[in-house]
Image: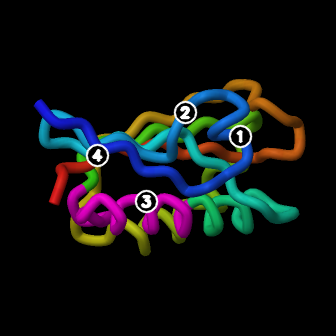
Amino acid sequence: MPITRISSGGEFETKIGYCRAVVAGGFVHVAGTVGQGDTVTDQCAHALDIIETALKNAGSGFEHVVRVNYYLPDRHEFEACWPLLQAAFGENPPAATMVECNLIDLKYRIEIEVTALAG
């Protein structure tokens, strides 16, 4: 079964040994993604942009996402992201989980990971 690896060119992909997305078994698995910005909503919007690009590069899109995981160091910040998430997934909401946990750096307020059907 073929496997396609999609890199976003980020510096940590080679340092850590991962890629932005892997297409395998009929699914696109997008790595946990953080965004840049000062607020949780800035970071959420940027992470969604990065994820959208990875999905497009895999021939998929938000309408094909079947699972999403959200990781936040402060669960109270999650609600501020809801309008952005609603706009991204719209009429095609995936199964979702939100976990409160520490992220790799204190500056990050949200990390998003998705699984989508391959295009």
Among numbered discs 2 and 3, the one appearing first in the sequence: 2
| Dot 2 amino acid type | Tyr
The kind of secondary structure element at disc 2 is loop
Residue under pointer 2: 18
Circle 3/circle 4 CB separation < 8 Å = yes
Name the mark nearer the viewer: 3 or 1: 1
Q: Residues within 10 Å of mark 2 (few under 14, many from 20)?
A: some
Which residue is found at the position 66% from the left and 37% from the top? 14
| Residue 28: assigned label | 4
Among numbered discs 4 and 2, the one appearing first in the sequence: 2
Query: Residue 88: where, in percent of width, then height?
Result: 41, 69
Residue under pointer 1: 12
Which stretch did the figure color magenta?
Answer: 48-64
On whether residue 30 falls in the magenta region, the answer is no
Query: Residue 53: where, in percent of width, then height?
Result: 45, 67
Residue under pointer 3: 54
Q: Quadrant of residue 104?
A: top right
Q: CA distance from mark 4 to mark 2?
A: 14 Å
On screen, residue 91 versus residue 7, left or right, reads left
The kind of secondary structure element at disc 3 is helix
Query: Residue 84: where, in percent of width, then height?
Result: 53, 69
Along the line of sight, the residue nearer the viewer: 28 or 34:
28
| Residue 79: assigned label | none
Q: CA distance from mark 1 to mark 2?
A: 8 Å
The kind of secondary structure element at disc 1 is helix
- Quarter of the figure with the N terminus: top left
Q: CA distance from mark 3 to mark 1?
A: 16 Å
On whether residue 63 falls in the magenta region, the answer is yes
